[in-house]
Image (spheres, rainbow, N blue to C red):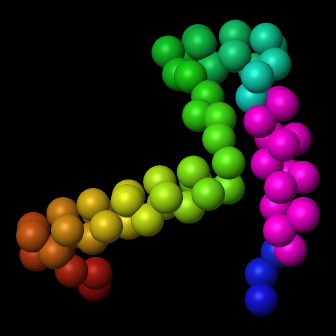
Amino acid sequence: MGTPADIVNMLNASINEILRSPEREASLAKFNAKPKIGSPQNFAEFWRAETEKWTNVITSAGIKAD
């Protein structure tokens, strides 16, 4: 289940191309931001790390959803 790998890879290549454009870089530079260009695997790794980090913060702080 999920999006087929060839579609994910095609979307990733297109998004990376857009992020590399001088216009996009200039637009992001206004906010002192730089694009994070990478593979779907890079994003999955980032997502896992962020989920773990923020789960630990929420658990440690005793934050509960009401």
Left or right: residue 35 compared with residue 3:
left
Residue depicted at 83% across the width and 68% down the height? 5
Residue depicted at 90% across the width and 52% down the height? 10
Residue depicted at 56% across the width and 61% down the height? 44
The magenta stretch spans residue 5: yes
The rendered magenta stretch, by its main secondary structure, is classed as: helix
Where does the image place residue 47, in percent across and percent down from the top left? 48, 60
The quadrant holding residue 41 is bottom right
Where does the image place residue 49, in percent across and percent down from the top left? 37, 59
**Residue 26, relative to residue 61: is it above or below?**
above
The quadrant holding residue 34 is top right
Q: Quadrant of the N terminus?
A: bottom right
Observer-nearest of 33 and 11: 11
Q: Which residues are magenta?
A: 4-18
**Residue 47, relative to residue 25: is it above or below?**
below
Observer-nearest of 66 and 22: 22
The quadrant holding residue 29 is top right
Where does the image place residue 40, in percent across and percent down from the top left? 67, 55
Residue depicted at 53% across the width and 22% down the height? 33
Q: Quadrant of the C terminus?
A: bottom left
The magenta stretch spans residue 35: no
Where does the image place residue 53, in percent across and percent down from the top left? 27, 60
Left or right: residue 53 compared with residue 19:
left
